[in-house]
Structures are given as structure tokens and as C-alpha cells.
Amino acid sequence: MVLDHLRNAGRFSGEGLNLLWRGIGRPARGLARLRSRAPERLLISPQDIRTADPTVAADIYAGYFAFAGKMANTHGKSPFEIEPASPAWAAALAGFGWLRHLRAADTALARANARALVEDWLALSPRNPALPAREPRVAARRLMSWLSQSPMILDGADRDFYQRFMKAIGRLVAFLQGARGDGARGEDRLFVAIALAEAGICTAGMGGLQRRSTQLLATELTRQILADGGHAGRNPQTLLDLLLDLLPLRQAYAHRGVAPPGELLNAIDRMLPMLRLLRLGDGSLALFNGMGATQPDVIATVLAHGDARAAAPVNAPYSGYQRLEAGGSVLVMDTGAPPPWEFSGRAHAGQLSFELSVDGQRLVGNCGAPDETRAALREAARATAAHSTLVVADTSSSRFAPASGLSKCLGGRVIAGVRRTTMERSDGATGHVVAASHDGYVARFGLVHERTLQLSGDGGRLAGWDRLIASGKPPKGVASPDFTLRFHLHPAIIARKSEDSLSVSLQTPDGAAWFFHAGGYPLELEPGIYFAVPDGARRASQIVINANAGHTPGVDWVFERAGAA
């Protein structure tokens, strides 16, 4: 723990120096942006492959803007004049991704409305400090949205608007070039690189931007995309968001007849299979490390750019995920350590947790991450107790920096806990076995958590073994701690505990029956919560086993389909 304190002190000092350096350099960088060069012309507009809804255009024209679970009525004002409904709402507004809905409407009214709203932004956004115009991720999204929707924005525009729009693009490019050393951290650096690369390939007269931005993109892809196709932050949502931008960028290079960097092609080729590994039988992504509700249409759109017939890979050792699949059952397990500190702002303390779907229905999983508007719930969802795994003394296996006080600059990143994980895997005709461990409880309790999962060859039986193994001398004053095994059930699952409390029957929406037991250990069926739904949290159930590490160092348990041999 002393090493953790020293390491965090160094990180705190480093962040302080970064803030100081950015503060000193900001006036000079701001002056450079004022002198930024505007592109001479736009050469192409990249495709936006996100799903668009033309009916949203009518809402926008009427002054209703719905983002991040919040609806705002402008009452005749510009949306850039009103008080934002939430920080996430403001970020979505300032990112202009909603322009795609106006383009999908494909009417003269929608095109005129789009141009008027961009013109409002150019005139009004500097006067509204509540809008996150200068956040690197938001600015990158705005640049990509403007480039992809430029044919609509400029349709029927006069020369004055055209020149102001081009100057605004030039200022955005200059800002994002400065943002690499002025606030962009973690995955934001990659999104900034993608936006700059898109601007470089889509514009003319930007003074070598294409060459510089292509090199920057290659550097960030090499740094952030792992050898198995996962992202350094281990968040499935980040992987999906990146592909939504990288796939159109690959097309843009092809349309210009310019060779894309090999790092871009290789990254996409690795990321698409990784996305399939993380996809459960119901078509949604596994709920690990910040993943919330999945949009099935978005997943389908992205995966359509790969080989739809290819089988999902099963082993992602660099990303720290394992996939077990047999007879209609699909299981994804977290076997990795927390992400590198820079990328851990949304990481969860869910080591050795798993999600299980059977015949297209989720059975067991994690609570998932709520949307951006529920900050307090997002922190609760990061706890080990919100995952289907073992918890010692109601303590998470990793600790996060607080979101307030002096630690606020650490951005909720992982500051202590799991340092090392192990994983072994075997596959055969009789089934698949994964044995893994983590050391997140060694510093506080002198215990290593070991978990083995075995999925039968027909997919009808999942057996698990959880053990707490002493590691060296336990810390002074630490008695044998209690521990809890939790198995969070999907809200659609009907669960009933037996009269003797030794088993739980489970029924899926299609009528299939499963049973759970733990070799004679008493079971509890407690209320749970499921965050990963678009319209807010839903009630669920969880199977709970309570024991003491001194008396019961391990528990064996089984999920079994009714009638399975």
C-alpha cells in the first residue's frame, strides 16, 4: 500500500505540472488559433454510418432537442442560448452529431434549418460558457460532424456563410492540434487524431495537415489498440465508438485515392473480431469497464463492414477477456488487470466477473454502466459488488480516485487494487475451462481470488469454483474476513428460491428452465439493479452466497439447464 501512495503522489504531482504547463501555454496557443489557416475548399465529405432518424428533424425544427436522456424545449430561442439540460446534453449538442437526422430528412426545410443552427453556433457559442465547446472530445466530434454533413450545411449557402464556415473549420483544426498538449488525455487523444486525419484527407490548402495528421493517427493507434484488437481502456463502448469513426475514415482515404496508414487498416482488421468476441447471444456487448446499453442497430452496422460469417475469436489475452461458447450458450469473462492509469477513468472493479447468455437471452451478468446523466450511479456501478464475482468484506478489488476534492484531477482513475492477474485456458470436446486469479485483495487481506469456470460441450452446464488463497502473511490486525459471491440476473429472468434455500430455479422469457445450486451452501435471493437500459435502471434479482474466508476458503457452484445430463 505504501507503493500505491507513492505512485499516486507522483501521478498527482504530474497532473499538477500538466495543468500548470497548459495554463502557461494557453495564451500562446489561443493566439495561434486566431491566426489559423482556413481550408481553401472541401474535397470530399466522409460518410456518417451512425443510424439516422428523419423524424427527429421535425422535433429539432420545433425546438425540441433530446440528448443523453434529457429533453429541452428552446421556446423559440436558439439551443445555444438556453441553459443546458445536463453536461452530457450540452456535450451532445456541441458535438453536432444530430445533424445526421436533418440530412436523413432530405428536405429543403431541414437543410435550411441545419445551416441556420450552424450559423447560430458560430455567433452564439462564445457567449455561452456552459457549452463544452473546448473539450477535446467534443470539439473532435463537432469537426467530424461538420465535415460529414458539409454538403447539407453548404447547400444554398451564400459566399459569406461559406467563408465563415471554412474559417470555423480552420479554427477547429488549430484547436485540436493544440489540444494534444492542452487537455486531451487517454482515448480522447485518439479521437482527436481521427478528427484531424479526417480534416487532412477532406480539405485542401491546410499546409501539410494530411501528412502530419496521418502520422499522428498511426502513432495513437499503435499506442492504444492492443494486439488482439481491444482498446487500452478495456471498455467495449470505446471500441464501438472508435470503429464508427475509423470505418468512414478508411473509406475517405480510398475515395481520395490516398494510401491509408497501415496502422489504420491493421487496427480495423483486429478490432472487428474483438467486437464479436465481446458480443453475447442476444446481440449486445458484454457489460465490462464502462459499457452500458447497447444499440443493436449500431452493432449490426459496424459488423457489416467485416466478415459476417466469421466465427468470434475466443481468447483476447492482451485485452483480458475470454469467450466460452457451446450449444447456444455464450460466456464472456473478465480475466484482465485494470487498464493503464491514463485509460482507467471508466474502468470497473469487476475482475473475474462473467456474463452468460443462453439461446439468445442473457441469464447472468453485471449491472452495467448507467448513462452520463447519473454520475452517482456510475460510481456505484464500478464497485465489485455490481459484478458477478466474489467480494471480500464488501470491499472492491480496486479503488478509484474520488470525483471531488484534491483527487478530482485524477479523473476517477484506478489508484490501488489489482496489479496482477493470471489466466489459463483449455478447450476440448467435453467443454471449455478457464482458470484465472487476481491479487486485488492481497494488500488489505492477504488473499488471492482464484476462479475456474467450466462450460460443458453442449452448453447446458456451467460449473464454477471460487477460492481465496492466502498470499504471504496477512496484514496485522486483519481477521478472517467475510466474503460474498454475487450472481446478478437479467431483469427478464424469473427466479425462485427453493424452500430449503439450497437451490434457485430460473426461467427465461422463452420458457426455458435453469437451476442454480452451490453444493449445499445456503443461498439468498436479493434485490438487484440493472443499469444498462436506455430508459434508466430496472429492478432485477441476484443470487447471493455469504461465507467467511477462515471457515470456508472456497465455494463450488453450478448453473444447469433443466433436463441436462
Image (cartoon, grey):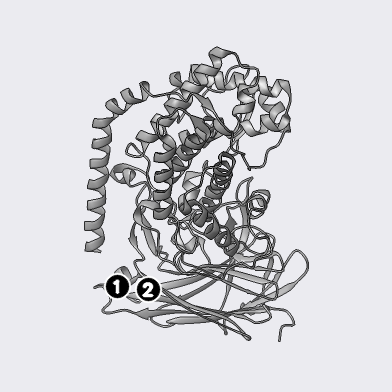
Q: Is residue 277 left or right of residue 495?
A: left
Q: Residue at x 26, y 51 (%)?
A: 11
Per the image, label 1 sits on a secondary structure element best described as loop
On residue 536, which mark appears? none
Give the residue type that dot 1 points to.
Val
Residue 85 sits in which quadrant?
A: top right
Please name the residue that numbered disc 2 is placed on: 481
Vertical position of residue 183 compared to residue 30: above or below: below
Q: Residue furthest front?
A: 257
Q: Residue at x 26, y 73 (%)?
A: 475
Q: Is there a contact, CB below 8 Å, between mark 1 and mark 2?
A: yes
Q: Quadrant of the N terminus?
A: bottom left
Q: Nearer the viewer, residue 134 or 347?
A: 134
Q: Residues within 10 Å of mark 1 (few under 14, many from 20)?
A: few
Q: Is residue 16 left or right of residue 184?
A: left
Q: Nearer the viewer, residue 438 or 268?
A: 268
Q: Position of residue 150 (x, y in %)?
A: 59, 28
Spatial separation of the CA atoms under disc 1 and disc 2? 8 Å
Q: Position of residue 148 (x, y in %)?
A: 59, 34
Q: Residue at x 59, y 21 (%)?
A: 117
Q: How many marks?
A: 2
Q: Tell me, yes or no, if residue 216 can be seen here.
A: yes
On residue 478, which mark appears? 1
Give the residue type that dot 2 points to.
Pro
Q: Tell me, yes or no, if residue 86 can be seen here.
A: no
Per the image, label 2 sits on a secondary structure element best described as loop
Q: Position of residue 230 (x, y in %)?
A: 49, 59
